[in-house]
Amino acid sequence: MKPLKIVKNISNEIFNGFLLVDKPKNMTSNDLCQILKKRYNIKSCGHIGTLDPDATGLMLLAFGRATKLLPHLDTSDKTYIVTVRFGIITDTLDLAGNIIKEELKEINKADIYEALDYLKQQKTQLPPLTSAIKVNGKKLLEYQRNNEEVQIKERNCHIIDLKILRDLYKEDKYYQIDLILKVTKGYYIRSFARDLGEQVNNLGVVKDLRRISIGSYTIDNSYPLETLLNEEISLIEITKFLKYAKIRVNERVSNFARNGVTLYDKNLFVESANIKQDLNRFIVYYNDEPIAIYEKRDGEYRSIFKF
């Protein structure tokens, strides 16, 4: 197997960058990180947007010091392709769980369309018990595992867009429907399947789930795990992965930035007037050297990362 191409930054540190990976089935998101850490002898790896073991699709992975930037990435919207199966419910709301009830009923297409329209208008959602959301310091999945009662509150999240990929059809003895869902942060597709079933007086679970986008990042630019294990692939350098404005400063201000000092408009020299339109986040450069990444907060610019 060819080794991963090492990417060095200005400080000659290695493995500081990002990868978009197409996660296969039958592994957790953490499994994916551990495999790549072991394969390439990387000390730190983090990710955004956990996928269940049976789910496939886009994972955004950060390596080395780039993991510090994960909380700052704009990944609020996510898009999924989902197959909802009717007539069955499990304790995990997908086919990986234990069957709680099975009841096959006829389904009317008109009822499905009405239910989809209803769910598109909802601005809150009840999360599944098998989630990592914490209540009183303990994850919901721990309550379920221990057969403990817990009160779950609805969360503010919603569907941004919904399209039918394949209309209501039968596979084996079950009715199914294939959809594309674009949703906000915190939205659970498994809960959507449950709710869709309930809206048509039926049972519903996720049969297949594939994530195809996270924010502006898409599955088209990702690597299959097999490719990463067998070919020479470069990490995406931080400055190339983050499409932030470049602000060039003089030597005096660059020294401020190197030390994480808060900056103000009077400190910044903008190359182009167009850049000034969006300075929520930007990379400070001295000559051609990236110094730090800054974020606008309360009318001032604060350092969130130093190269």
Image (tube, rainbow, N blue to C red):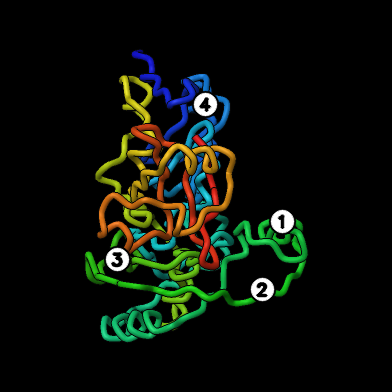
For the residues labelled 4 and 2, say whether their Cβ atoms are less than 8 Å apart: no
Quick check: 199 left or right of 224?
right
The residue identified by callout 4 is 37
| Residue name at image x 63 percent, y 61 percent | 133
Measure the alpha-carbon separation of dots 2 and 1: 13 Å
Q: Classify 198 as above or below 11.
A: below
Q: What residue type is labelled 1?
A: Glu
Question: In this rendering, is residue 169 above or below 307?
Answer: below
How many discs mark residues in the rendered view? 4
Where disc 4 sits, the SS reads: helix
| Residue assigned mark 1 | 142
Label 4, label 2: how far apart the Cα atoms are: 36 Å
Q: Which of 181 and 26 is in front in this view?
A: 181
Q: Dot 3, crowdedness within 10 Å: few (<14), some or many (≥20)?
A: some
Q: Is residue 72 visible?
A: yes
Going by the picture, which residue comes out furthest to the left? 166
Does label 2 or label 3 sit earlier along the sequence? 2
Residue drawn where x is 48% and y is 50% of the image:
294
Q: What's the CA distance linking mark 3 and mark 1?
A: 30 Å
Residue 9 lies, in percent from the top left, at 43, 26
Quadrant of the image occupied by residue 20: top left
Task: Decide which of 205, 172 is in the foreground and name it.
Answer: 205
Q: Residues within 10 Å of mark 2 (few under 14, many from 20)?
A: some
Secondary structure found at label 3: strand
Kind of residue indicated by mark 3: Leu
- Residue at which label 2 appears: 152
> Mark 4 to mark 1: distance in Å?
28 Å
Q: Position of residue 39 (x, y in %)?
A: 47, 21
Q: Which of the image's four quarters has the N terminus?
A: top left
Secondary structure of the residue carrying tag 1 is helix
**Crowdedness near tag 4: few (<14), some (14–19) or many (≥20) residues, C-alpha within 10 Å:** some
- Answer with mark 3 or mark 4, whichever residue precedes in sequence: 4
